[in-house]
Amino acid sequence: MEKKGLGRGLSALLADVAPSDEPSLMRPVMPPDRMIPIERIHPNPNQPRRTFDEKDLQDLANSIREKGVIQPLILRPLQDRPGEFQIVAGERRWRAAQVAEKHELPGVIRELSDAEVLELAIIENIQRADLNSVEEALGYRQLMDRFGHTQEKLAEVLGKSRSHIANLLRLLTLPEQVLDMVRAGQLSAGHARTLVTVANPEQLARQIVEKDLSVRQAEQLARTIGDRKPKKAGKVEPQKDADTRALEQDLSANLRLQVLINHKPGQQKGELRIRYTSLEELDGLCQRLGG
């Protein structure tokens, strides 16, 4: 079966809605289809954005109290709950409107599939720079796992380079403790990328945070740690070339597990290792390889 491509019409739909919560003097805001009671509007459980800053919400709520909700939410009807709607774009405005004690919100109603809703949610947040690197990567992973989209197709529709998407997906191979540091803003995506190929990313992450290292300093520290497995006395392990390391990272991103390639220089053979840290990860790998 041919995989469904992402729709450029969705990007056009979102572009019709001004990308800020203030009125645009250069571009008209899409008029709402109707005013919807706030209790009939529900958040999307697959929304890629998980973190909402309380201060930002309060600032937006103050603006809504003074000026109202200028930009309508994009909504879709809930098929099993007539008269109720799911948020496609605008959850932050919906949350702030509750703080501002608003009873109804302007909404643009569209019939959209699950894939289209997820794409719009990701596009909206990327345009507004509201996603942290982990949330953005998880959004891309959802589109790939649930709907069969490729990195190339995502890059084309979302206006990102394939390398940007691939680099973010590699972050998902890191331990959850390290990802939490990225979510909290303790580590940047650049810092986190240096940890993908080291033996103990949690330990190195703590050093980066404690010493307040720059990305370049973190890269130097990662290089001094070297290969994961201890070297035998008197034996010097050859350095991996850039292509091998890039292939390791691509495979790690696609399998969501740590992948090592040991290729014997000048020969056609080598060894590929896939590391897992739990039986759940092993079971997931078996399902993907058997599928």
Image: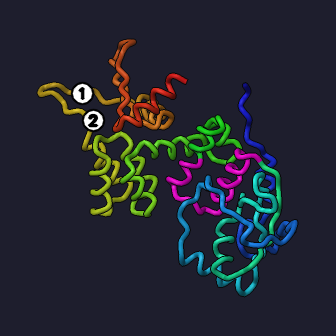
Query: Considering depth in this image, is 113 or 66 the residue closer to the camera?
Result: 113
Q: Is residue 209 shown left or right of residue 157?
A: left
Query: In the image, 117: left or right of 279?
Result: right
Label 2 amino acid? Asp
Q: Is residue 272 magenta?
A: no
- Colour convention of the picture: rainbow
Q: How many labels, in total?
A: 2
Q: Which mark is first along the chain, 1 or 2? A: 2
**Secondary structure type for disc 2:** loop
**Would you call the spot at circle 2 few (<14 residues within 10 Å), some (14-19), or many (20 or more)?**
some
* Residue 237, disc: 1
Quadrant hosting residue 249: top left
Q: Quadrant of the N terminus?
A: top right
In the image, what residue type sits under mark 1? Glu
Q: Label 2, on which residue?
A: 227
Mark 2–mark 1 CB contact (< 8 Å): yes
Most foreground residue, 223 or 253 = 253
Q: Residue furthest top?
A: 268
Residue at 59% across, 80% down = 58
Main secondary structure along the magenta-highlighted residues? helix
Q: Quadrant of the C terminus?
A: top right
Q: Nearer the viewer, residue 239 or 254?
A: 254
Quarter occupied by residue 40: bottom right
The structure residue drawn at horizontal position 17% and vertical position 25%, both measured from the top left corner, is: 235
Q: Position of residue 66 (x, y in %)?
A: 72, 87
| Residue 88, position as x, y percentages in the image | 72, 58
Taking 231 as reference, is 76 above or below it? Answer: below
- The location of residue 147, given as percent across then percent down, is 66, 38
Q: Which image quadrant is residue 187 in?
A: bottom left
Q: Does residue 137 belong to the magenta stretch?
A: yes
Q: Which residues are magenta?
A: 113-139
